[in-house]
Image (tube, rainbow, N blue to C red):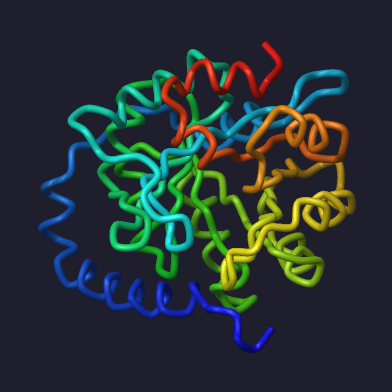
């Protein structure tokens, strides 16, 4: 609909300005960061952790997300809670942890990636609006295993270049599409992990059925991820009956008083 709000465009415009500011201060940022010791083949480890073998349960990428432009505040920040949340997700059976890095829109910080990576051994997804190779370098320094790349935010040739750059840094690109046309673009890249977001990032409307239908065409040699829109065990079971190897869950866990128990309930434990 033409009168639907467009959440994504202003975020991307702000992110372009933010990336340019960071690049101007890149030398200082590199010396200020403390490297996190992680395996050299961290991208391959992430792919292996998210791939669902025949008969196995759906893998869960549990997300640390403070707020969203559409839902508002989900969970207020408290001292040390990134590590606590990551550890709670690990106890609940998560296969990986996604960390929202954008501050103004989602209440996150790139440093939250380092905090999560220091707290658990699970693969960490650097979830950010990535437009430049410098952000991939930052993700690696902070200890991430995976980097999110949005089809909708990038031209196809730029997307392929950033996928290649992510792989060159030993990380796994996670290419996110929102419909069948975008999924074709995602599959044309070298990314081994491909996701379909049930939430349209321009309008924030959710259509889980459409996401599941799109994931059905993902080849078996790729890891297929159902992203967003799963809030209860019934929805997770529906996704598990489809093509998805993994599902990303954020809001339902962040709103829960006990994220470990909530994740176990969702997983049927």
25 displayed left or right of 56: left
Residue 41 appears in the rendering: no
Image x and y of residue 180, in percent: 81, 66
Residue 122 appears in the rendering: yes
Q: Is residue 119 above or below residue 231?
A: above
Q: Is residue 128 above or below residue 54?
A: below
Residue closer to the observer: 38 or 80: 80
Image x and y of residue 251, in percent: 51, 42
Image x and y of residue 238, in percent: 83, 35
> Residue at coordinates 54% horizontally, 36% vertically from top-left?
252
Picture quadrant where residue 4 is located: bottom right
Quadrant into which the N terminus falls: bottom right
> Residue at coordinates 44% horizontally, 32% vertically from top-left?
40
243 displayed left or right of 46: right
> Residue at coordinates 65% horizontally, 88% vertically from top-left?
2
Picture quadrant where residue 204 is located: bottom right
């Amino acid at each position: 609909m033409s009168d639907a709000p467009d959440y994504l465009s202003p975020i991307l415009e702000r992110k372009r300005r933010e990336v340019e500011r960071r690049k101007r201060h890149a030398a200082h940022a590199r010396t200020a960061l403390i490297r996190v010791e992680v395996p050299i083949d961290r991208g391959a480890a992430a792919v292996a952790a998210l791939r669902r073998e025949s008969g196995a349960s759906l893998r869960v990428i549990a997300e640390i997300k403070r707020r969203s432009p559409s839902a508002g505040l989900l969970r207020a920040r408290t001292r040390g809670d990134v590590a606590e949340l990551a550890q709670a997700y690990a106890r609940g059976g998560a296969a990986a942890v996604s960390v929202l890095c954008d501050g103004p829109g989602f209440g996150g910080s790139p440093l939250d990636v380092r905090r999560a990576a220091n707290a658990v051994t699970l693969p960490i997804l650097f979830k950010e609006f990535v437009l430049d190779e410098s952000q991939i370098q930052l993700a690696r320094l902070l200890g991430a295993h995976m980097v999110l790349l949005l089809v909708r935010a990038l031209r196809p040739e730029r997307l392929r270049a950033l996928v290649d750059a992510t792989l060159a840094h030993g990380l796994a690109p996670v290419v996110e599409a929102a419909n069948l046309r975008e999924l074709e673009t995602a599959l044309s890249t070298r990314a081994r992990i491909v996701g379909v977001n049930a939430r349209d990032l321009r309008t924030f409307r959710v259509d889980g059925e459409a996401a599941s239908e799109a994931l059905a065409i993902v080849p078996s040699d790729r890891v297929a991820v159902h992203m967003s829109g799963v809030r209860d065990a019934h929805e997770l079971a529906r996704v598990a009956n489809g093509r998805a190897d993994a599902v990303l869950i954020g809001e339902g866990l962040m709103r829960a008083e006990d994220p470990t128990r909530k994740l176990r309930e969702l997983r049927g434990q």
